[in-house]
Amino acid sequence: MFFLRRVLPPACAGALALSGVLASPAAADPTPTPAPVSTPTPTSAPTSGKAPPRPDDAGYYRHGNRPAYKVLVFTKGAEPAVAEAGTGLVRRLGREQRFAVDATADAAAFTPEKLADYRAVIFLGTGAGDLLDAGQQAAFEEYFTAGGGYVGLSSAAATEPSWSFYTQVVGTTAGQATATAAKATVKVADRVHPAGKPLPERWQISERWYDYAANVRGTAHVLATVDESTYTGGGMGADHPISWCRDYRGGRTWYTGLGLSAGTYADRNFAKHLLGGIEWASGAATGDCGATVLANYEKVTLNDEPGEPMTMAVLPDGRVLHNTRNGQIRLYDPATGLSPVITTIPVYSHDEDGLQSVAIDPGFARNKWVYFYYAPPLNTPVDDPATPGVNEGDAPVDSADPTVWDKFKGYNVLARAKLVEEPTPHLDLTTRQEILRVDSNRGTCCHVGGEIRFDGRGLLYLATGDDTNAGGSDGYTPINEAATRNPAYDAQRSSANTNDLRGKMLRIKVAADGSYTIPKGNLFRPGTPNTRPEIYLMGLRNPFRYDVGSDGTLYIADYSPDARAGDHRRGPQGTGKWFVARKAGNWGWPYCATRDLPYTDFDFTTRTSGQPFDCAGGPVNDSPRNTGLTKLPPVERPEVWYSYTAETPARPPSPTRPAPARRSSPSWARAASARWAATSTSTTAG
């Protein structure tokens, strides 16, 4: 088992941490990036009745307007309209944000003495070709590696193609651009960095769009991408970076592919984008441009023979708790490199059952609470080694006697105990507090989930799987209601059951005594009949891994079933999904792959199909094993869904603009619609 440790320059180590996984920093670059500069207190504008002087006016600074810093706009090679519009915008931003602007198309400005006056040099649409001689190149390299900033706009990525240092500063070189401007959607990935923070998540702008010789993801921090499905002519595919940044050899580099068209400089969002880039490159604003640069991490092996590793939790002092499914909890100590077992939790083991996760309390430094989610042994049947031909721990698949499954009823437990250091580090199980139980059907497979996380308010999130065996469902939805079939083959009893904690994201607030309260905003109010108030999200299959922001925003991946092709009698092919959840909701399983991709009701006894489930209006759970509400909430839309053959749409249609016809209605859905429209009777499956 291993984890990735962030390696930072000395100047950054004190300011940044990656999800708490920051051990002793090591220098990735001997030259620190420039420290942020302070902005002086604004002074009053002159009251003579004349227009206030501009930063490029000779009398501006004599009126007491001192700039925070200066930038140089370099426009050699730029189209005249772009140079004029771009320089005008930068000057306006300088007046508003109190930085001085010099602009020139003369490469003679590239001397060590002149460049020393600037916190950033802006290559504004400088275009293809060699612009600087060897001496000027050396001056810029000296300036940049001493802590200077680089801002590149649009065709600046095509500048100086034979100068390797410049190419490394930009990160790649520009390829072809679309011949004419076209409106497309920019997707802003980092809305914390100053160049993305003021922007919407999706932003439409008309521009000429560049392809690039290489994708910079992994070598630079991608701030935004352009969605190639929204314009014609893109050649980079689904991941087309359009703006990025990074710390490089002591300097700061920020680039945007926008600005090739003069009209771009009139766009308000672009002005915010550009200002953030200038401020970051100048050191006037902070931003993490190293979080997704692969070279900034080193692989740290915790234990090269850990059994079946599951999760880890990094302690404030840099030690790492990690667990295996068989119940072992280990503690890695970076000081010794050792990872001994410190506690073993007794667990029931069968298929995916066992110790699923460990996590630490947000107040761990003070209270030492360690949380874990596991299957206690109970009296569940287990395999008898004396009978090698029979596994007594396997629950029957079919039986005319429904009581045969009673002995396989169990539960998983969310609990916590304190980590103590003496005589050696261990979990003191005498302090154990059981927080809640989640029912389970044992002796079969699959989907336990079990990851524990906390948000910035101290709310605890627990992801649970649907506890359902996918066998016998032909790779489609497991909704077998037959009385002679093991209940574990019907996900309606779990994920679609509002009165069951499986196939859910649970959200609670744990109290000092181990009890808990229900935060506002969960899916069902406390006291609502036939519901569990702990449920925040329902309709999940196996949300095995997820993340949560400090504000409670959830980022979830949910696994798909296994059908390799869609069938109108059953539903779509296996469709996984990624989504962002900011509020309570129903994510559809086992009735809907997405809001627009319903499964078809199916009788496993007669092998006949019914109607597609109503995802938009809210599916109906009429399973005899359902103990919750019959009418369920409408199904939410994920951000991304995908299938085995790309037959499923890759993105949802916009509320104002439908997706292209070839994507919005896959072949199986068109066939299904035709059949469903032609007949109101069931279709017999072959």
Image (cartoon, rainbow, N blue to C red):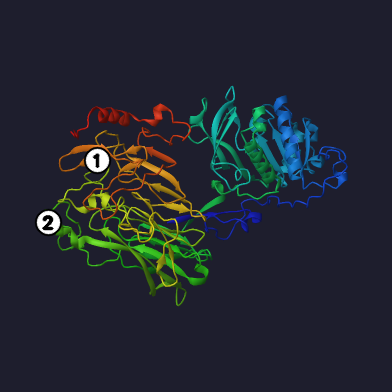
State the image coordinates of residue 77 (x, y, percent, origin top left).
72, 26
In front of the other: 145 or 211: 211
Q: Which residue is mark 1?
A: 601
Vertical side of 495 occupied by 614: above or below:
above
Neighbor class of circle 1 (other Cα within 10 Å; few <14, some 14-19, many 20+) is some
Q: Looking at this view, is 359 or 681 the one in front?
A: 681
Taking 485 as reference, is 547 left or right?
right
Where does residue 580 sit, x and y in percent of width and height? Answer: 46, 47
Q: Mark 1, mark 2: which one is toward the viewer?
A: 1
One can see residue 683 in this view: yes
Direction left: furthest residue:
400
Determine whether the residue tagged by mark 2 lies in a helix, strand or loop: loop
On screen, residue 30 versus residue 626, left or right, reads right
Mark 2 or mark 1, which is nearer the start of the sequence?
A: 2
The single residue placed furthest to the bottom in the displayed view is 423
Q: Secondary structure at mark 1?
A: strand
Residue at point 41% right, 42% down?
637
Q: Amino acid at mark 2?
A: Asp
Q: Which mark is residue 401?
A: 2
